[in-house]
């Protein structure tokens, strides 16, 4: 419970407050005002809709291995687009230039350059604000690629004072990774409605924003079973198909595309996955699918 | 690929001979440039003047594993003496995921 109050759901709001002075803060993103306050290059203008904006805990290895379908495209980890990232790492090198500070960061899983732009108007910080090599820090930022090299554009960097946060972060990154690749914990998948989510509190809360799932199907009641090892896309499709009465011919792929806001290839991939898991099948042709558990 | 320092503890040392690792342990004894760390098992750490280990504190060290399973400390970070129990668990309980390559990959 101790950790809960320090780092849990509440922790995210406190980041907003802390980062507010320097970097436009996260509260503005969630608050719904236009991202105009963020003047950093490649900022919110190029991002997708703000509602998709999430803050995802990652390791440096995940960042280095993030995939990019084509240059200029959004980076993806576990097939989920990245917006804001947070990581915990140790500073290995500091290079201070007039316009930006570049840190070489190492979290044990890899090393990554983190750049923070210096604001000319920024209030001079006390000596305590200066970051030194070997210090552990929490970084919030977005992944950028420049000249084939990846770096993290940091909005906010703060030193870590409670070292439990390091392990907390790794556990959180693992939990999110597993959630996105293998689905929610099996026991929880079968719990009906909101209870499951409240029990799971902090972890799940963020995922809901990430996948946009679960909540959509809240009214469905009844069968909320997700097979283990299905991706977030598949779960989203399950929710959507379950949320409306099914035609005897099944649901057309294009209808699913429209309803869930995913691209056609993503939907096809997910359906393939569901068919593979034995819970979806095609009906009159390959474009109509039906769920096995939806025989209402 | 940039360098990695897998987080391990005493029982896993055997698998990491000759590699650079990262581990968290409690300093139980210091004798000159030799210190004893407890990280789910006893580890002999060879330090240098700058290592600055403090008796009784929990330290994180980045070190190289010698063939005799002692470690040569490269850098160390003092985590103080006020840590939760998760530090004494087998490395974060993450070994399982590491072995499967989810986070570290390529070894073990």
Image (cartoon, coloured by chain):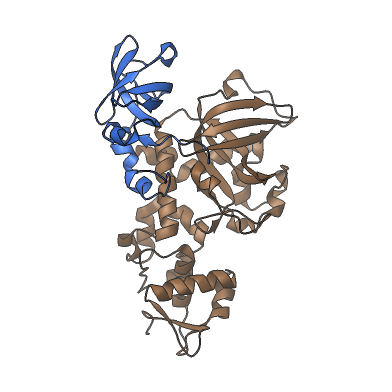
In the rendered view, would you say A76 is above or below A279?
A: above
Looking at the image, can residue A283 be seen? yes
Is A238 positioned to the left or the right of A133 in the image?
Answer: left
Is A220 positioned to the left or the right of A18 in the image?
Answer: left
Between A257 and A127, the one nearer to me in the picture: A257
In the rendered view, would you say A245 is above or below A214?
A: below
Between A95 and A262, the one nearer to me in the picture: A95
Question: Where residue A134 appears, x then y in whole percent?
Answer: 50, 24
- Locate the C terminus of chain B by quadrant: top left
Is A116 positioned to the left or the right of A214 in the image?
Answer: right
Between B80 and A296, the one nearer to me in the picture: B80
| Quarter where residue A178 is shown | bottom left
Is A248 positioned to the left or the right of A188 in the image?
Answer: right
Question: Where residue B44 appears, x then y in whole percent?
Answer: 29, 21
Furthest residue to the top?
B32
Looking at the image, can residue A34 be seen? no
Q: Which residue sits at x=31%, y=16%?
A: B35
Identify the colour of chain B in the image.
Answer: blue
Question: Where residue A262 appears, x then y in whole percent?
Answer: 57, 68
Question: Where residue A19 appears, x then y in whole percent?
Answer: 60, 37
Q: How many marks?
A: 0
Q: Which residue sits at x=39%, y=60%?
A: A182
| Quarter where residue A141 is shown | top right
Furthest residue to the left?
B41
Identify the colour of chain A in the image.
Answer: brown
């Amino acid at each position: 419970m101790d950790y809960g109050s320090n780092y849990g759901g509440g922790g995210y709001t406190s980041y907003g407050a802390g980062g507010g002075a320097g970097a436009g803060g996260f509260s503005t993103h969630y608050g719904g005002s236009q991202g105009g306050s963020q003047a950093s290059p490649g900022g919110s203008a190029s991002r997708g809709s703000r509602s998709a904006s999430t803050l995802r805990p990652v390791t440096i290895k995940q960042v280095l291995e993030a995939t990019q379908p084509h240059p200029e495209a959004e980076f993806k980890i576990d097939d989920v687009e990245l917006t804001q990232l947070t990581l915990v790492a140790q500073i290995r090198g500091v290079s201070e230039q007039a316009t930006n500070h570049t840190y070489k960061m190492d979290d044990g899983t890899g090393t990554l350059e983190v750049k923070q732009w210096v604001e000319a108007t920024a209030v001079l910080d006390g000596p305590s604000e200066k970051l030194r090599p070997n210090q552990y820090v929490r970084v919030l930022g977005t992944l950028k690629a420049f000249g084939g090299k990846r770096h993290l554009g940091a909005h906010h960097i703060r030193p870590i004072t409670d070292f439990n946060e390091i392990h907390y972060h790794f556990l959180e990154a693992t939990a999110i990774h597993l959630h996105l690749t293998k689905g929610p914990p099996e026991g929880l998948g079968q719990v009906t409605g909101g209870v499951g989510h409240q029990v799971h509190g902090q972890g799940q809360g963020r995922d809901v924003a990430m996948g946009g799932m679960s909540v959509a199907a809240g009214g469905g009641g009844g069968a909320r079973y997700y097979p283990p090892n299905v991706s977030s896309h598949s779960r989203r499709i399950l929710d959507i198909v379950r949320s409306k009465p099914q035609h005897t011919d099944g649901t057309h792929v294009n209808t699913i595309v429209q309803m869930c806001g995913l691209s056609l290839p993503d939907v096809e991939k997910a359906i393939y996955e569901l068919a593979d898991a034995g819970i979806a099948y095609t009906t009159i042709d390959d474009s109509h699918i039906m769920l096995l558990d939806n025989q209402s | 690929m940039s360098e990695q320092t897998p987080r391990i503890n005493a029982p896993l040392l055997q698998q990491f001979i000759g590699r650079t690792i990262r581990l968290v342990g409690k300093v139980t004894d210091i004798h000159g440039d030799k210190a004893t760390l407890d990280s789910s098992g006893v580890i002999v750490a060879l330090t240098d003047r700058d290592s600055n280990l403090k008796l009784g504190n929990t330290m994180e060290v980045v070190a190289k594993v010698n063939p005799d399973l002692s470690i040569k400390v490269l850098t160390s970070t003092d985590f103080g003496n006020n840590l939760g129990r998760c530090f004494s668990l087998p490395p974060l309980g993450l070994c399982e995921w590491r072995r499967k390559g989810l986070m570290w990959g390529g070894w073990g």
